[in-house]
Amino acid sequence: MTEEKTEIERSLTDDLLPSVERRKEGPYALCECHQRIPCNPCLTSCPTGAVSLDSINDTPEVDFDKCAGCKQCVSACPGLACFVIDETYSTDSALVTIPYEFLPLPEEGETVNGLDRKGNFVKEVTVKNIDSFSDNGKTKVITVIVPQEAVHQIRNIEIREENHG
């Protein structure tokens, strides 16, 4: 796999990331919306008021000073575009929290394939935990342990067939 970032990875991460200092303080949300469409569940689900929109058609902005990394936006986003990143997990590994709407669910501790935004394999990652925040229970929130160098690439997972036959 090439080390060079794709244009979308570059624009998403360079434009959306908090300062290096803030990234060292703990988890933060990223809203990687690709389109300007009428949508605001990330805004209404945020208990700290960290997500803002100038209008219902704008892409959300995160105030990283207010964001607690609570994962509510991950569960609420119908576009599956919100993620929570924690680069402070360990010196070698970070946590990436993703929305997940497939069955079967992986198990905690299971090794799964970490995928990029296009569904391409990046690295093997380990499922740390699985949460369900929404009332409808359809979108699970899965946190995976990823190598630090892949923290801004991993945006989905794929269960390995040998684990679920």
Image (cartoon, helix red, strand yellow):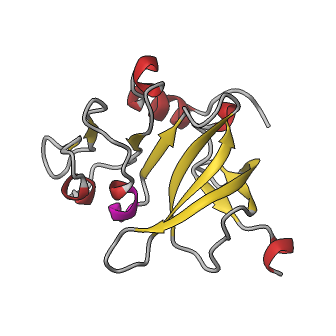
Question: Does residue 120 sit above or below 77 in this rendering?
Answer: above
Question: Does residue 128 sit above or below 10 in this rendering?
Answer: below
Whole-percent x, y for residue 39 in the image: 23, 58
Whole-percent x, y for residue 81 in the image: 42, 53
Residue 13 visible in the picture:
yes
Whole-percent x, y for residue 155 in the image: 57, 50
Write the residue at 71% across / 31% down. Answer: 92
Write the residue at 34% across / 80% down. Answer: 136
The quadrant of the rendering that contains the C terminus is bottom right
Query: Which one is in front, 20 or 5?
Result: 20
The quadrant of the rendering that contains the N terminus is top right
**Picture mark count:** 0
User: Is 48 positioned to the left or the right of 137 in the image?
Assistant: left
Q: Which residue lies furthest to the left in this view?
A: 55
Q: Does the stretch in magenta take in 78?
A: yes
User: Is 73 positioned to the left or the right of 100 in the image?
Assistant: left
Residue 39 visible in the picture:
no
Q: What stretch is highlighted in magenta?
A: 74-79
Whole-percent x, y for residue 147 in the image: 70, 37
Query: Which one is in front, 40 or 49?
Result: 49
Q: Which residue lies furthest to the right in this view?
A: 162
User: Is 115 positioned to the left or the right of 60 in the image?
Assistant: right
Specify the quadrant of the image occupied by residue 104: bottom right
Q: Does the stretch in magenta take in 49?
A: no
Write the residue at 39% across / 26% down. Answer: 18
